[in-house]
Amino acid sequence: MALELTYFGDTRVPVEIEGLTPDWACDKSLAEIARFELFHGNRRLPLAEMFRITGSANDRRIDLFGDLSGVHWLGAGMASGEMHVHGSVGRHAGSHMRGGTLQVQGNAAGWLGTALTGGLIHVRGDAGDLVGAADLGAARGMTGGTILIDGNAGHEIGRAMRRGVIAIGGTAGDLVGFNMLAGTVLVFGGCGQRAGAGMRRGTIGILGRTAPQLLPTFRHATALRPQFMAVILRHLRNQGLTIDESLFATEFEIYHGDRLALGRGELLVRRGAI
């Protein structure tokens, strides 16, 4: 039986709930969970003042209900188990996750999966800026795990990421893979300006039928159908992302860059994209 948390807070003041995860709650009584402290602005409050709490977390599953768009840090630091959000979430959902699964049925605000090291985040709607990015002032973003977004995403997706996979089913904003160290970012629609700026290694795929405007610091290498693309597409499909089947038979133009950085990254564009 899952632990069910229903949010009834009615406030414009941000609510932060960092640390309430399935691995923390699995051996706690409902009374102990009710006393978990969240932040309402700069005030500490027990969880029970803003959430109705039922069920049990013994099976390491938490289901959350209500308008959680003003509730931040949900799933942050999770190491195992499952969290299912039946709606939208605020900033920093899944930040610093080490394992487990975070499923969001609505939208996610900015900083989704910041500094992720493991696990799976799947957002069925849209996401904001800085998905999988580095914390402010940090040198590295996500270093493992997978982030799937069915809809669109904002700017600076995968900024300074080191490992892992980010897949955007729709479009992305400017600076996809900005200062990327390694890892993989796939955008199945179009993207904004300066994709791959400052990237050192890694792979960025802009897989829509509209070609991005590439920076002059990327050099065309070849056109081919890379074997790894079919592997990763099958993996993403198995994880629940909808994949355009035509991509399995598509050739891609491959560019190397950013030559202002180390220049060993690769950027893939659908061949024939306009």
Image (tube, rainbow, N blue to C red):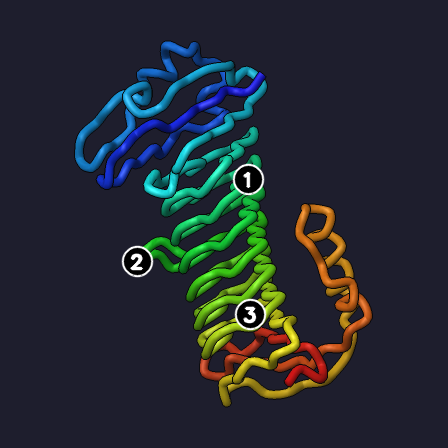
Residue at left 51%, top 33%? 79
Q: Residue type at mark 3?
A: Arg
In depth, the one of 156 and 189 nearer the eye is 189
2 horizontally vs 68: left or right: right
Q: Residue furthest right?
A: 249
Comes first in the chain, label 3 or label 1: 1
| 10 Å crowding of disc 2: few (<14), some (14-19), many (20+) | few
Residue 72: x %, y % from top left: 35, 40
Examine the rendering and report whether any part of residue 9 can be seen: yes
Q: Residue type at mark 1?
A: Gln
User: The N terminus is located in which quarter?
Assistant: top right
Comes first in the chain, label 2 or label 1: 1
User: The C terminus is located in which quarter?
Assistant: bottom right
| Image vertical order of residue 68 relative to residue 167, above or below | above
Q: Secondary structure at mark 2?
A: loop
253 horizontally vs 125: left or right: right
Residue at mark 2: 137
Q: Residue type at mark 2?
A: Gly
Residue 233: x %, y % from top left: 72, 58
Residue at mark 1: 103
- Disc 2 to disc 1, how far (Cα)? 28 Å
Comes first in the chain, label 2 or label 3: 2
Residue at mark 3: 201
| Image vertical order of residue 180 relative to residue 108, above or below | below
Asked if the residue at tag 3 contacts the one at tag 2, i.e. Cβ–Cβ closer than 8 Å, the answer is no
Residue at left 58%, top 54%? 150
